[in-house]
Amino acid sequence: MRGAAASLRSALLCVFVCGAFHSALAHSPGVDDQDQAAAHEVEAFREFVKRAVDAKDIHALRILYADSFTHTHGSGRMDGKDTRIVSVMAGEPLIENAPADDIRFRVHGEHTIIVTGRSPILNTKENKTYQFRWMAVYVKQGQDWKLAASQATRLP
C-alpha cells in the first residue's frame, strides 16, 4: 500500500508540475497564494481521480476515496466508498469523470476544499442526459488529498 501511495504522490506531482490548470483557478484579488496553491493541488487531484475512474483502477480508487466517503444522488440515495467503487467498475455515469463547467473552488483552512460545478449526466434507465449541479469535498489527510463527500442535484 505504501508503494501505491508513493506512486499516487508522484503522479499527482507530475500532473501539478505539468500545468493541468484551468481558468477557474486564475488568481483572484483577495485570494492568498496559499489558497491558490491548495486549489491547484485539488484540481490536479481531481484530474487524477478522473483518470482512475476512466481506467477503472480499483487500487487507486481505494486510495483516492476517503474511508468515510459518501455520495448523495439526486434521488436522495446515499452510497459509501465501496458502493461508489462498484459503480465505477460497472461503468455507471459519475460526476467524477463527467465533463464539467462553472467549477468553483472554496478553500476552508489547510485541509478542506469544496468544489462545485455543473455536469451533464446520463440517466441510464431513461437513456436521457440531464444537467446536474454538484459539489465535492476534498480533505487533506497527512500529505494526501482524499475525496471525502459528494452530492449531485438534477437541474430542472
Image (cartoon, helix red, strand yellow):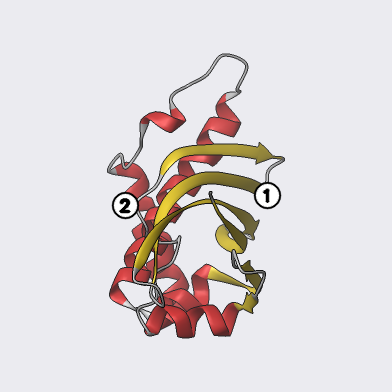
Image vertical order of residue 22 relative to residue 74, above or below = above
Is residue 82 left or right of 92 when viewed as pictured?
A: right
Sequence order check: which comes first, mark 1 or mark 2? 2
Residue at (37%, 29%) from the top-left corner? 23
Q: Quadrant of residue 59?
A: bottom left
Amino acid type at image mark 2: Cys
Residue 117 on image: x %, y %? 50, 44
Residue 153 on image: x %, y %? 59, 56
Is residue 62 left or right of 100 when viewed as pictured?
A: right
Give the residue at mark 2: 14
Q: Quadrant of residue 38?
A: top right
Q: SS of the residue at dot 1? A: loop
Residue 75 on image: x %, y %? 61, 69
Q: Which mark is residue 141?
A: none
How far is disc 1 from disc 2 in space, using C-alphas? 21 Å
Give the residue at mark 1: 111
Amino acid type at image mark 1: His
Q: 11 or 50: nearer the eye?
A: 50
Residue at the limit of the structure toward the right, as seen here: 109
